[in-house]
Image (cartoon, rainbow, N blue to C red):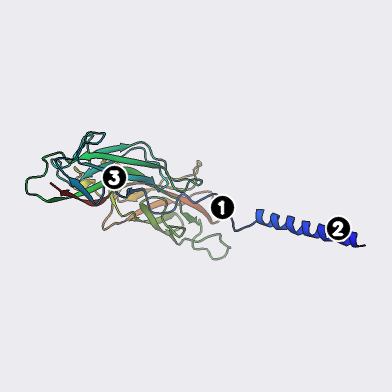
Amino acid sequence: MSNSKAILATLLLVSVLISGCGGVRRGTDRPSPVYDAHSGTQGLEMRLVPNYPPARVYYSLYNPPNQDGYQNPITVMAELWNRGAYDIEYGQVYLSGFDSSIIQFAEGNVYSFAPLEGKTSFNPEGGYTTVEFKGNVPAGALPEGMDHYLAKMVLQSCYEYQTEANPLVCVDPQPYSTIQDKACTAQTSTMGKGAGGGQGAPIAVTAVEEEATANMLYFRIRISNSGGGIALSPGSLPNCPFHLEYNDLNRIEYDVRLGGMGAGAGAPVKCEPSEEGGNVVRLIDGHATVYCTFNMPTGEYSAYETPLQITLRYGYKKGMERTVEIRNID
C-alpha cells in the first residue's frame, strides 16, 4: 500500500513538472521576433565615439611620432546606423569647422560609405558601419605664444532617402446613403500611432483627411519633417553640404496611388502642388500639405477600405559637433 502511494506521488510530481515546463514553452510573455520596420522618425543616426576626438590634445614640437608618422595625432571616429526602413544606397560624411592649416587630415575630410541596409522585420537595429578620420597637428602649426586652440569638429551626413506610407482609406460609392450597413466611412486618419510614430523615415506622413462625393474622392495629406535634420531636393546630394542653394532645400517629390499593387491601383486625376517635370512640395517651417483628387472607382456598390500608397523621395542632411582643445605644452 505504501509503495502504491509512493508511485502515485511520484507520477503527480512528474506531471506537475511537465505541465510547468510546457507552460514556459507556451508562455505569451515572450516578445515577438517580428518587428514593425515602418515605424519611427529616424533615418541615418550618427554618433561620435567617446574620446574620438578627445576633449584635449597636447601639442608639442618634441612629441615622438606614432606609427602613422604623426607627432600630435587626432582621430575623429563616428558610428553610423540606418535606423529607418529604407536602404541607403550612397551617402557621405563631411568633417569641417577647423583651420586646415592647424589640423590636417592626410586622407581628406570626406568619407563615402557603402550601401547601408535599413531596418527590417527581423533586424530592428538597421545596418551599421563606422567612419574614421586620422589627422595631425604638425610641428609649427600653432603660432608662437599661442597657448591653446579651440577647434570645432563638425560632422555632417548627406544621403538620399524615401518614405513609404500606406494608410487605409474608405472608398464609398454611395457616400450619402444611410440605408445600408457600411464597412467604413470617409474620415481623417491620424498616422504614426504605433511605437515611435512615423513610417521609419525622417519625413513622416502625419495625417490623411478624406472627403467624398458620388463621383470623386479628395485627400489632404499632411507631411512633417520629424527627423531633426534638413530635407533636400532629390539629386542635390553632389551639392551637400557646402554648395547647397535655396532651391535645394525642403523640396520633396511625391507619388500617390489609390488601391493595392494589382491592376486596379488608380492614378490621381491631379495632385497639387506640382511643378514642371513632376509632383514636388516644399516644406514650410517643417510642414507641408499635398492635395490629391481621384475618380470614384467604378464597378463597386458597397464601401470598402483600401490603401492609399504614398511615396516621398528626398535628400537629407544632419550634423553634430564636438569641441577639441589643442593645448600647447612647450
Mark 2: amino acid = Ile
Residue drawn at (81%, 58%) of the image: 10
Instruction: Residue at 14% x, 44% y: name it.
Output: 99
Q: Quadrant of residue 4?
A: bottom right
| Total numbered labels | 3
Q: Which of 325 and 316 is in front in this view?
A: 325
Q: Tell me which label, 1 or 2, sits earlier in the chain.
A: 2
Q: Can residue 235 be seen in this view?
A: no
Estimate the x, y position of residue 77 in percent, counting from the top left: 30, 44
Task: Identify the element where label 3 is drawn.
Answer: strand
Question: Which element type, helix, strand or loop, lies under badge 2?
Answer: helix
Disc 1 marks a residue whose amino acid type is Ser
Residue on which disc 2 sits: 7
| Residue count near mark 2 (Cα–Cα under 10 Å), binned few <14, some 14–19, many ≥20 | few
Q: Which of marks 1 and 3 is nearer the N terminus?
A: 1
* Crowding at mark 3 (Cα within 10 Å: few <14, some 14-19, many 20+): many
| Quadrant in which the N terminus appears | bottom right
